[in-house]
Image (tube, helix red, strand yellow):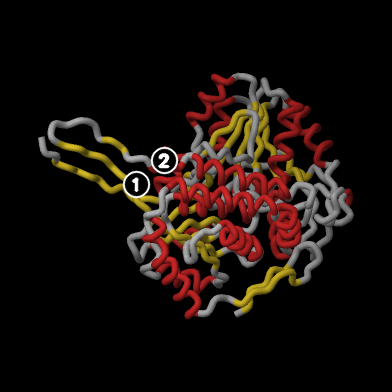
Amino acid sequence: MSIKCVSPVDGRVYAERSAAAPAQIDQALQRARAAQPLWHRVPLAERAAIIERFCGEFERRGPRLAGELSWQMGRPIRVAPSEVRGTLERARYMSGVAAAALADLDAGPKAGLRRFIRREPLGVVFTVAAWNYPYLIAVNSVVPALMAGNAVVLKHSAQTPLCAEAFAECFAAAGLPAGLFQVLHLGHADTEGVIRDPRIDFVAFTGSVAGGRAVQRVAAERFIGVGLELGGCDPVYVRHDADLPHAIENIVDGAYFNSGQSCCGLQRIYVHESVHERFTRGCIELIQQYRLGDPLDRETTLGPVVRTAAADTIRAQVRAAIAGGARPAIEERAFPRSKPGTPYLAPQLLLDAPAGSSVMREEIFGPVAGVMKVRSDAEAVAQMNDSPFGLTAAVWTRDEVAAVTLGEQMQTGTWFMNRCDYLDPALAWVGVKDSGRGCTLSVIGYEHLTRPKSFHLRVST
C-alpha cells in the first residue's frame, strides 16, 4: 500500500511512502522491545544529554523543517518556524523536569522500615500523531516517554510523513541507541494491529473523536493505558470589563491561526451585550485584513485548509449554521483565492449564532467562528459548558478574581484569562468529555508514561 501526502499548496503529491509490511512491523516492535530494558538502565543525565543533542539537531534543521511543513499541510511560511521553536521549548522543558517528575516518592518514616514509590517505564509507547501541529503533537509524548526510559514507535499522519522522519533523523544524529525511536508508516488496519500487539504497552493518540473511539475499542481488548487528545469546540467569553482591542486581536488570532485547524482553536465566542457591537465590529475589520493565498508567499497570512474535501465539509457546516439562523459577517468574494473545489477557503464570522447551530455545537476544523450575545456571567458559563467538548476555554476581563471564580465553574481542561490557543509545557494538557482523557506535559504528564512500583523494605536495626 502507498501512503501519499497530497500538498494543499497545489494539489500535487509532495511525498509518497510505502506502508510498512508485516515483517517490517514485527522487526520494529522486536527492536523496540529489545532496546528498552538497556535504555532503562541508562542514567537520567545521559538520557537528558541525548535529548539536548536531539534539540540541537532539530534546531539546525529548522528552516528546512518549516518549509516542509508548509508544503505538507499548508501553514504560511511566515509563521511555520514558530512550530520548530515550540517543539524545542517543550522538549527542553520536559527533559528539564524529568528528575523531579521521576524522583522516588518517600512514604515517610516508620520504625524498622524504608518505604518509597518509584516510577518505572511502561515499556514501548506507540504514538499516533495528527497532521495539524505535527511536531508539537508528537513531541508531547515522544520526549517524556524516552526520558522516562521507554522506547517509542511513532506513526504519523499520512499528511505529514516527513515530520516523523525528521524526528528519526535528529534522534539518530543525537546518538540515541538503535531501536529506541522508530517510525512506521501505517494504514488504519495495521495501526489497529500494532495496538493489539502485546509488545505495545501504551498508546498516545491525537486525532478526531471518532478516531479516539476506534483506538479505545481496540486497546480495550488489552490492559494497556491510552492517552487521547481529541476534538474541541472551544469557547471564550468577552466580559463587560474586557480590554477590547486586546481581546479582538487575540481572539481573532486564536480562531483563525493555522486556518482554524487546531483542536484548541477558538470557535464559540460569547460577548457581553454591553460590548457586543464594538467587539464584533473590531473583529470584522481585523478578519478582513487577512490575506488568503499560497502559503509559500511570505505575504500570505491565511493558508489553505489541509485538503479540498475538508474545505467542502467546512462550507457545508457554515451553510447549515446560516440555515439555522446565523448571519455571515464576511463576504467570500473579498477573498478571491477562495473557490469551491479547492482547499483555499475564506474566513467566516457568524453573528447571532443560535446555541443549537452547527458552529456552536460541532467542531469546525477551519477558519470559522460564531458569536453569541449574553447578558451575564451566569449565562456565559451556562452556554460555554453546553458542549460535548472540554479542551480549553477563556475569558477576557480585567478582574482576576472574577476570572478564577468563572474558571472554577467551567468544564474544561485548561482555563485562560486574557489569552488562548496556547500550551504552556509547565501546565498539564488535558481534556474532559469528548476532548479526551489522560494528560501530557508538566510533571504530571510523566505519570501516564510510567507505572508506580512500591518498595517496602524491612531494615535491620
Looking at the image, the residue that sits furthest to the left is: 461
Q: In which quarter of the image is the N terminus?
A: bottom right
Q: Would residue 412 be seen by someone viewing this image from the given angle? A: no
Closest to the observer, 164 or 219: 164
Left-right relation of 228 to 219: right
x and y, in percent, of residue 158 in the image: 63, 67
Element class at badge 1: strand
Mark 1 crowdedness (10 Å alpha carbons): few <14, some 14-19, many ≥20: some
* Residue at the spot 70% in from the left edge and 43% down from the top edge: 255
- Residue 82 picture quarter: top right
Query: Which percent across, then down, holds residue 324?
Result: 68, 48
Q: Position of 299 compared to 173: left or right?
A: right
Q: Quadrant of the rendered structure where residue 286 is?
A: top right
For the point 67% across and 72% down, the residue is: 4
In this figure, which residue is indicated by the disc labeled 2?
A: 101
User: Which residue lies under the disc numbered 1?
Assistant: 119
Q: In the shown orientation, is residue 265 left or right of residue 31?
A: right
Q: Point out residue 460 in the picture as x, y percentages from the top left corner.
A: 11, 38
Q: Quadrant of the C terminus?
A: top left
Horizontal side of 324 relative to 138 (left or right) equals: right
* Residue 223: image location, x then y, percent: 33, 60
Say whether residue 255 is visible: yes
Residue 100 versus residue 358: which sits nearer the camera?
Answer: 100
N-term-proximal mark, 1 vs 2: 2
Q: What type is the residue that disc 1 sits on?
A: Arg
Tell me the kind of residue under disc 2.
Answer: Ala
Mark 2, Cα crowd under 10 Å, few <14 / some 14-19 / many 20+, is some
